[in-house]
Amino acid sequence: MTGARAAKRRKRPPHTPLHPRPSVPLTLVTGLVLVYTLLPLAWLVVNATKDQNGLLDSFGLWFADDSHFWDNIGRTLTYDDGVFVRWLLNTLLYVVAGAGGATILAVLGGYALATYDFPGRRAVFAVVLGAVAVPGTALAVPTFLMFSNMGLTNTPWAVIIPSLISPFGLYLMWVFAAESVPTELLEAARIDGSGELRTFFTIALPLLMPGTVTVLLFSMVATWNNYFLPLIMIKDPDWYPLTLGLNAWNAQAQTAGGEAVFDLIITGSLLTIVPIVAVFLLLQRYWQSGLAAGGVKE
């Protein structure tokens, strides 16, 4: 037995920076962070199976005697003439138009700033960094006044147009394009007679795909969870995103004669995060792909 243990120890690889020694304190801290992260999601899943009475009578982190999960989903989708579906479609509109447009502009702008030299490039860099440092809430009132003067408040454009501007996405794509798109590769394509658009779409864009997906996910999450901008811009419930719609349902319990629908709020919150989780799982492979694998001939 002793000889077998000694042989097993000898087979273990030595501890190196690539194979560090396991750290018990670090493992415990990581486990605590994992529990802290997953606990709200677990609470949401558990309580989405309860009806209104079950939420008040049972333990919050365990299931009630009867499951009402599918009934809650059906009631959430049909409550108040199916307004939840309308809010979901509004959110999808804001994400596709706003986050999608912001990603396209960030990719085009970042690529241009990284590959072309022109007067005022340093000034643009300073402006982009300054815009990243300015919080969105500081611009909320000026943005509202500007859109109010143009008559665009209480319309989808009041949410879509500000969402098109992503200074962080532009800066990220600028840095990413400067590191991932070899200048020699672009020059070789131009020498072979490739135009700028063809060079961008056939050579640069595939190399920029991991950064593009990252900016897209950041923009999607920011637009999907956006609450403050629609709050000051949208007053018509028919144009509410999911964030404002669920808050309106929550406010019903605080109004005289209002109906408390906490079971629908919890189920609606669970349905709200499902698309974001699905998108992350579908697009995560782009982060792991090689940035320039096969891009340059040996």
Image (spheres, rainbow, N blue to C red):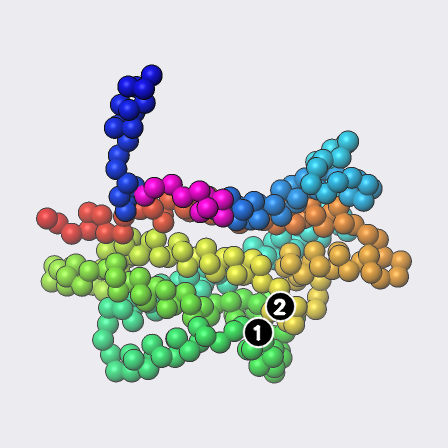
Residue 218 seen in the current view: yes
Q: Residues within 10 Å of mark 1 (few under 14, many from 20)?
A: few
Q: Is 216 placed left or right of 6 in the picture? A: right
> Quarter of the image containing the N terminus?
top left
Q: Measured from the top left, where is residue 193 in percent x and y?
A: 14, 61
* The image quarter in which residue 175 lies: bottom left
Q: Residue at x 41, y 65 (%)?
A: 169
Q: Amino acid at mark 2?
A: Phe
Q: Which secondary structure type mostly characterizes the magenta part of the structure?
A: helix
* The image quarter in which residue 101 lies: bottom left
Q: Are marks 2 and 1 in contact (CB under 8 Å)?
A: yes
| 229 lies above or below 272 | below
Measured Cα–Cα span from mark 2 to mark 1: 8 Å
Q: Residue furthest front?
A: 2
Q: Residue at x 34, y 41 (%)?
A: 21
Q: Is 63 placed left or right of 140 in the picture? A: right
Q: Residue at x 62, y 64 (%)?
A: 227
Q: Secondary structure at mark 2?
A: helix
Residue position marked by numbered label 1 in the rendering? 137
Q: Amino acid at mark 1?
A: Thr
Whether 246 is among the magenta residues is: no
* The image quarter in which residue 207 lies: bottom left
Q: Measured from the top left, where is residue 196 in percent x and y?
A: 23, 65
Q: Measured from the top left, where is residue 16 in percent x and y?
A: 26, 43
Which circle's residue, 2 or 1, is located before the other in the chain?
A: 1
Q: Is 197 placed left or right of 224 in the picture? A: left
Whether 27 is among the magenta residues is: yes
**Residues drawn in magenta:** 20-29
Residue position marked by numbered label 2 in the rendering? 228
Label of residue 65 in the image? none
